[in-house]
Image (cartoon, rainbow, N blue to C red):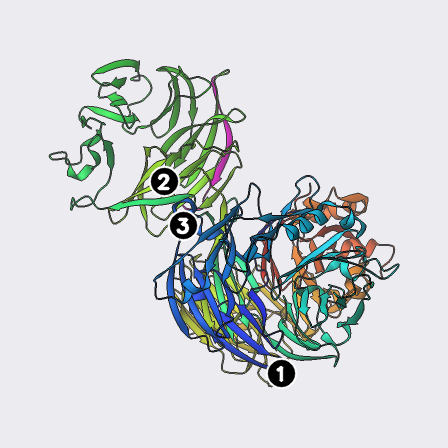
């Protein structure tokens, strides 16, 4: 199975710190700061909008004034200071960074503080600090000062005695994958009275790390630091090593060894170290739901450590594996960060939850692709809710990373009217409309301003933008290579075409530097020439070629010719210098019946040896794509302007002519990674639960719900990204199912509505006329479900009753009536999830409680039932964390083709299904539970011939999902590609057999 993560949200908690020795804890979630007081279990919340565009946030105290402050550092290096607990803005400054740290502001990472300074790592190599006094001064700047420049990547850093310049640094051993530590003396602090560099303690620290004592303590599990006084504790499987005013070593009690299978083998971040009068109290939480704690008496270093354990499993009532962070407060209170529940405050001695504050996290409930005609998925629309009263619609596009191209100049070159072309000359950019007396005959302007018109030439191509070197086909159909003042006739093309239409591209490759390879097209055929000699021709029957582009990809791929046509198809041909043949490499159809233009993206000379994929701009006025030739993939390039023309200027720079006739100059850095860019619409009170695409791909139908059971259906315009029409159902209830009807119906949608009152259950017909939504039919029925299906003009709904009908126009031609094809009969029940026609006489229904049911429509009876409990699926019974599994009925012969070679058990069923595959639909049951995806064949022909009719026993495939969580929906996008929605995650998986 292949997969791609479109969106994955980790814990949205950005910052967590206990204040006042555990009496208060500050938690920052998104743009909100929560201050929790343990004494009265109160929670104060403050929204800080400046957190949205910030790179880091932290809190610090001023000892002399006993004041607490909260700092927010923006990406623009602005510093905002707020007081605590009111969170009022008290200061605004800008971080002053020396030239040696330029362009590295985003790499700033806070790690520790003392009474006078805040310490950071910068660019993963440097230790720097900011004076707290600078933050509270009247100066508009706060200076960043260098402490130490390491020769390796700093993974962690701890203050030991910052007044003496002593710090503990951690780096990762790349060979063994473990942390190694060293104590450094920065030697940059000025000696003041009473403060000097203690060489003895430095020797003690360094000597301890280099001696055999740490090895006797076993495996290093974690490193925990405490601020006052400065203490660093190394937690080992058989004891602890402590750096404080001196070095301490404590071993566990005899035979108490915390190995990987014990409570310390699965620690959750947030181990807590508290300073007391006689020593330290250390507490930790593990993913098994236990808290381990011990008291360390610094006055009795020879006394073994005795560990105590307390469990949270019995009263938390949540999935323990969702807990991502832990902090112990005073007494027995703890704060836990759960990915599913939010922020939990609990008292493990009283065994109760004190308070819960939910996260604002995307819970995806449905998703669909907006480019079904493309060869791959690059645009996805998803919907869901942050909480029960806040919904969202998200548009995700697979795009070129924002840092790949940098805008370095935007200019408008006078008022020349509409610009259709431009060229690079020694005077700069010359727009076509600024050439006098050129009317519509202007064809080309060379580097030294030589003007070619259609009266003297058929086609021209500039070869270099720094000298006057270009190719030209003159009116006599002769091909010339023009260089400065000479024009060399290299070929006669009169016999090939009339050249009423002409497209040209040329390159010189690294492997054949003396050969000028030229590609020419007359709109029907492409011709390859080597130094003017015709060597190959490739015909496109009726293709109507719009542009060609030659590219030297690499030694493995070689030279390719990219050809676009007016139907939106991009054809990539390989050219061989040895055989002098053009052969098909691959084709891409971008879904639009419009011509695309091309611009080669040149490789960039960089210091890295990492190879650069060959890529090309493919664009028109609707958008820009990046075509990756080695990976045979493409993705969008999200811009803030519409593109008319793109040309390569040289020196890794590209000039874009926008639709409003501005010239935008871009610099390419040679890095072209991709990301899923998001655009989002948020709706208060309404949570979006389902969506279907309409005939016009610009519009999507959204289903939304409120907490008081109001239901709404809306038309969403993807282009304008707004809801343009809506229909609110008058009764309270839930929209259980929705089905967009196919031919012979045109713009109709069927809704299955389950009302709160007994008489409000119904099936509703909605018609989409243009961009408006109208209710055009209703049928009252008791006990509706989500199970709707269509076969031809026949529609079925099965709930408490199974109803099979057609829609028939009423005499007024504006509304529909339900024409029943047979009397309704007993169905599977209101918990039915899905249904599909196996044939004209057999209906397959998936019910959440009853399992798979087959109905003979001729006799109106259920002919077989296969309960969920009888599946040979052990994971279904493991419901400690997830409850019921997600069930989905899929159909199609393409799926069966994927699994026909997976295991001998599929081979056993294959002969039985062969006669059926050609005439009937083959249903499959998809079950997602825990991290497993299991797929069962549930065709009645197999079940009828099965030796044991008591269970659905054909497991076609078993896949391991790349996540653990509750699946909320699963949608088939292509033959064996699926979009999977979960809380906080959107995943695209491909089930192609490997």
Q: Which residue is mark 2?
A: 667
Residue closer to the observer: 306 or 514: 306
**Do we see residue 950 in this rendering?**
yes
Tell me residue 676's x, y (percent): 50, 52
Residues at marks 1 and 3, CA–CA distance in whole angstroms: 51 Å
For mark 1, does the 10 Å Cα neighbourhood hold few (<14), some (14 to 19), or many (20 or more) residues?
Answer: few
Task: Look at the image and give the residue range highlighted in magenta.
Answer: 580-592
Tell me residue 357's x, y (percent): 59, 75
Q: Which residue is mark 3?
A: 638
Secondary element type, mark 1: loop
Q: Which residue is mark 1?
A: 39
Tell me residue 462's x, y (percent): 28, 27
Q: Main secondary structure of the magenta part?
A: strand
Nearer the camera: disc 2 or disc 3: 2
Sequence-first tag of 2 and 3:
3
Secondary element type, mark 3: loop
638 w.r.t. 516: above or below:
below
Residues at marks 2 and 3, CA–CA distance in whole angstroms: 16 Å
Q: Going by the image, does 890 lie left or right of 660?
A: right
Residue closer to the observer: 893 or 983: 983
């Amino acid at each position: 199975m292949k997969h791609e993560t479109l969106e994955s949200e980790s814990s949205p908690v950005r910052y967590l710190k206990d204040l006042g020795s555990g009496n208060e804890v500050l938690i920052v979630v998104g743009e909100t700061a929560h201050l929790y007081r343990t004494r009265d279990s109160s929670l104060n919340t403050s929204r800080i909008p400046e957190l949205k565009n910030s790179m880091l946030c932290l809190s610090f105290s001023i000892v002399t004034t006993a004041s607490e402050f909260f700092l927010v550092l923006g990406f623009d290096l602005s510093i905002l200071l707020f007081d605590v607990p009111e969170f009022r803005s008290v200061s605004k400054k800008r971080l002053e960074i020396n030239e040696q740290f330029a362009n590295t502001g985003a790499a700033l990472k806070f790690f520790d503080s003392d009474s006078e300074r805040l310490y950071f790592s910068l660019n993963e190599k440097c230790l720097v600090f900011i004076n707290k006094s600078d933050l509270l001064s009247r100066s508009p700047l706060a200076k960043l000062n260098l402490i130490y420049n390491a020769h390796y990547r700093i993974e962690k850093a701890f203050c030991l005695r910052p007044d003496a310049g002593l710090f503990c640094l951690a780096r990762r051993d790349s060979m063994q994958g473990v942390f190694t530590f060293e104590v450094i003396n920065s030697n940059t602090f000025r000696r003041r009275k009473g403060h000097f560099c203690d060489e003895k303690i430095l020797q003690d620290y360094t000597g301890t790390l280099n001696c055999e004592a740490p090895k006797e303590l076993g495996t290093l599990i974690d490193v925990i630091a405490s601020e006052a006084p400065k203490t660093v504790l190394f937690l080992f499987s058989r004891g602890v090593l402590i750096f404080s005013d001196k070095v301490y070593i404590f071993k566990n009690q005899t035979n108490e060894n915390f190995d990987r299978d014990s409570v310390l083998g699965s620690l959750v971040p947030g181990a807590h170290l508290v300073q007391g009068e006689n020593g330290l109290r250390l507490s930790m939480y593990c993913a098994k739901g236990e808290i381990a704690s011990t008291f360390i008496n610094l006055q009795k270093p020879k006394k073994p450590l005795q560990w105590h354990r307390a469990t949270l499993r019995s009263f938390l009532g949540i999935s323990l594996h969702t807990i991502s962070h832990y902090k112990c407060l005073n007494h027995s209170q703890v704060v836990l960060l759960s990915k599913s529940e939010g922020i939990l405050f609990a008292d493990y001695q009283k065994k109760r939850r004190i308070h819960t504050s939910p996260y604002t996290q995307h819970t995806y409930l449905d998703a669909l692709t907006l480019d079904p005609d493309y060869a791959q998925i690059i645009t996805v629309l998803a919907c869901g809710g942050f909480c029960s009263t806040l919904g969202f619609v998200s548009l995700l596009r697979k795009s070129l990373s924002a840092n790949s191209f940098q805008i370095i100049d935007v200019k408008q070159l006078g008022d020349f009217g509409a610009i259709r072309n431009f060229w690079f000359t020694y005077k700069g950019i010359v727009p076509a409309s600024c050439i006098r007396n050129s009317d519509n005959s202007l064809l080309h302007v060379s580097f030294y301003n030589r003007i070619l018109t259609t009266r003297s030439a058929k086609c021209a191509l500039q070869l270099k933008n720094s000298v006057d070197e270009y190719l030209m086909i003159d009116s006599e159909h002769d091909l010339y290579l023009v260089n400065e003042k000479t024009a060399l006739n290299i070929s006669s093309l009169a016999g090939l075409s009339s050249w009423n239409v002409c497209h040209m591209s040329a390159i010189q490759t690294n492997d054949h530097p003396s050969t000028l390879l030229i590609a020419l097209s007359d709109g029907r055929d492409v011709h390859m020439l080597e130094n003017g000699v015709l060597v190959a021709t490739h015909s496109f029957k009726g293709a109507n070629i719009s542009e060609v582009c030659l590219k030297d990809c690499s030694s493995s791929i070689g030279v390719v010719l990219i050809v676009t046509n007016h139907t939106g198809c991009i054809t990539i041909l390989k050219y061989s210098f040895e055989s002098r043949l053009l052969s098909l490499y691959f084709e891409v159809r971008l879904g639009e019946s419009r011509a695309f233009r091309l611009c080669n993206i040149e490789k960039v000379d960089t210091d890295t040896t990492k190879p650069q994929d060959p890529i090309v701009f493919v664009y028109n006025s609707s958008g820009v794509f990046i075509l990756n030739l080695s990976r045979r993939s493409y993705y969008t390039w999200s811009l803030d302007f519409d593109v008319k023309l793109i040309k390569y200027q040289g020196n890794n720079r590209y000039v874009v002519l926008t639709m409003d006739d501005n010239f935008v100059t871009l610099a390419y850095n040679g890095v072209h990674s991709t990301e899923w860019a998001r655009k989002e619409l948020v709706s208060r009170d309404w949570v979006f639960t389902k969506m279907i695409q309409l005939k016009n791909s610009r519009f999507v139908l959204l289903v939304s719900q409120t907490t008081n059971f109001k239901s709404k259906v809306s038309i969403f315009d993807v282009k304008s990204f707004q809801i343009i029409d809506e229909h609110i159902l008058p009764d309270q209830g839930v929209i259980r199912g929705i089905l967009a009807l196919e031919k012979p119906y045109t713009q109709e949608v069927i809704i299955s509505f389950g009302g709160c009152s007994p008489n409000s259950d119904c099936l509703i017909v909605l018609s989409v006329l243009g961009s408006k939504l109208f209710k055009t039919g209703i049928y009252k029925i008791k006990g509706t479900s989500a199970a709707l299906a269509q076969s031809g003009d026949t529609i079925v709904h099965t709930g408490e009753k199974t109803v099979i009908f057609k829609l028939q126009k009423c005499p007024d031609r504006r509304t529909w009536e339900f024409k029943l094809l047979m009397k309704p009969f007993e169905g599977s029940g209101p918990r039915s999830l899905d249904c599909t026609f196996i044939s004209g006489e057999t209906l397959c229904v998936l019910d959440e409680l009853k399992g798979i049911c087959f109905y003979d429509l001729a006799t109106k009876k259920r002919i077989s039932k296969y309960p969920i409990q009888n599946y040979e699926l052990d994971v279904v019974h493991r419901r400690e964390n997830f409850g019921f599994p997600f069930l989905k009925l899929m159909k199609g012969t393409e799926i069966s083709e994927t699994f026909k070679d997976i295991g001998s058990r599929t081979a056993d069923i294959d002969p039985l299904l062969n006669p059926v595959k050609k005439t009937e639909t083959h249903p499959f049951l998809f079950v997602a539970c825990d991290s497993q995806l299991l797929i069962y064949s549930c065709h009645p022909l197999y079940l009828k011939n099965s030796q044991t009719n008591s269970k659905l026993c054909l497991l076609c495939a078993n896949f391991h999902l790349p996540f653990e969580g509750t699946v909320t929906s699963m949608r088939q996008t292509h033959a064996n590609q699926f979009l999977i929605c979960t809380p906080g995650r959107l995943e695209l998986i491909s089930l192609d057999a490997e």
